Amino acid sequence: MAAQHPIPGFPDDFVFGVAAAAYQIEGAVTEGGRGRSIWDEFCAVPGAVARGESGAVATDHYHRYREDVALMRDLGVDAYRLSVSWPRIRPDGTGPVNAAGLDFYDRLVDELCAAGVTPAVTLFHWDLPQALQDDGGWMNRATAERLAELATVVGKRLGDRVGMWMPLNEPVVHTLYGHALGVHAPGLALGFGALQAAHHQLLGHGLSVQALRSAGCGNIGIASNHAPVHPATDGPADIEAADVYDHIVNWTFADPVLLGKYPADELAALLTGPVDDDLATIAQPLDWYGVNYYEPTVIAAPGDGAGTVGVLEVDLPPGLPFAPVPLQGYPTTDFGWPIVPDGLREILTLFRDRFGSALPPVYITESGCSFHDPDPDADGRVRDTRRIDYHADHLAAVRAAMDAGVDVRGYFVWSILDNFEWAAGYRERFGLVHVDYDTLDRTPKDSYRWFQAMLTARRTDRNGDTRLPGS
Ligand code: FCB
């Protein structure tokens, strides 16, 4: 195992957590009255997901959640960021609540509290009920109201024990991959037309914040994917293209939430509906803002070469005003993502500069890396030294941002377990705990032991106090 770094100077009340999402870990997609989700449908499309894989079984967390919570307890984390499966709770998205589905999360939340791990709940982590998709999904404004109804149901049932709430996970990725490019569920390739789905998700966020507060819930934020965008060269055309891309992927999603406006009139002009009124709803005061960070992006002016975007290296349609190019000169994860810890410091300081006093405290709601870890060695160990280095370096970047005046309150590792990595399937392993997909056995990796050594010592010093409500 690599040397044990101390947690580099984080305050006592800094929250260390782990994260996962319902479709990626639960399995049991036909059990307990769960309805179909857009990911069940998408996985059934030939060629949509690597090797034809799906979340039908995943890590079987639905049946093994007690074992998984025990792993979190033994790890010593303060909090666990889970998502509720909308089709498990409201199978067709609009009709009656499925008591068995809500009961599952009630048991899970109780188990977490008994383990001293604060539940942090995401309402929508991309698994929309298929019945709502059949009515237009996020292209239909009514879906925003349906999300707020889910917020009321879940908030009333779990609000007495949940310590953090976030209605949305990464609306930018769900918009770009799911609605603009068609490489995630629901598989729509609408190009810029997808902005309407972004707007409705953001509206759903605002309505859900209101609904959660009405249900008596507090400590509400959002988990949004952000990263610095760099121009490929100092040339004005590349700088202009990078600026356009930055506005689309970062500020279209942050400005409405934090400032109540879109970053450019040209973007707002593409939307239909009472946009100004909606922006007032979207800009609900938040208790915190969550940043999911993986890698910076490099953008050039459009050329005649094939552009690809992000982690899936998706071919982009012609005619776009920007062209993503690979970031050279950095080590990569086994997923091919460049490892740039300083990009996390950079995006946090960009937020500080852009939003000033409009920025509430920040949590890193996801940070993690996929390495193709082998099965456990004969001695039962998974020697994932590179994952230890990854998190040590990203924590140091968070510390540097805090030293630069950004009020960061916590860091959630993506992910507690290896799991179903969407269109890339099971080959990409992000977990602190290895999952054998034949036996579903869990084996803590060396990275788990590394966090455990730091966190259990810290928790002992604090007498087990997690400093968050809910546990
Ligand atoms: C994020 C998603 C999360 C996981 C990580 C690797 O974009 O929110 O579900 O897939 O990437």
Image (cartoon, rainbow, N blue to C red):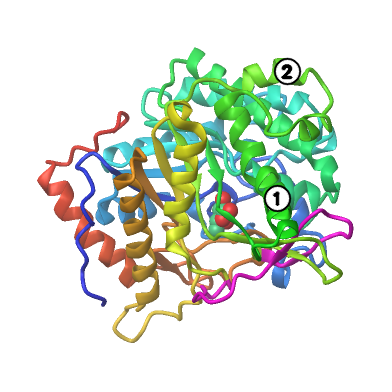
Ligand 1 within 8 Å, label 2 CB = no
Real-space Cα separation, disc 1 to disc 2, in angstroms: 23 Å
Secondary element at image label 1: helix
> Which residue is label 2 attached to?
276
The residue furthest bottom is 378
Does residue 131 show up? no
**Looking at the image, is mark 1 or mark 2 nearer the viewer?**
1
Residue 186 placement (x, y as % from top left)? 78, 48
Determine crowd level at label 1: few under 14, some 14-19, many 20+ residues with C-alpha closer than 10 A: many
Q: Is-magenta flag for residue 326? A: yes
Ligand 1 within 8 Å, label 1 CB = no
Determine crowd level at label 2: few under 14, some 14-19, many 20+ residues with C-alpha closer than 10 A: few
- Label placed on residue 245: 1
Side of 399 where 431 appears, left or right: right
The amino acid beneath tag 2 is Asp
Magenta stretch bounds = 312-336
Secondary element at image label 2: helix
Please tell me whether residue 420 is drawn above or below residue 286 in the rendered image.
below
Q: Between residue 55 and residue 206, name the one nearer to us.
A: 206
Mark closer to the chain start, 1 or 2: 1
The quarter in which the C terminus is drawn is top left
Residue 276 placement (x, y as % from top left)? 73, 18
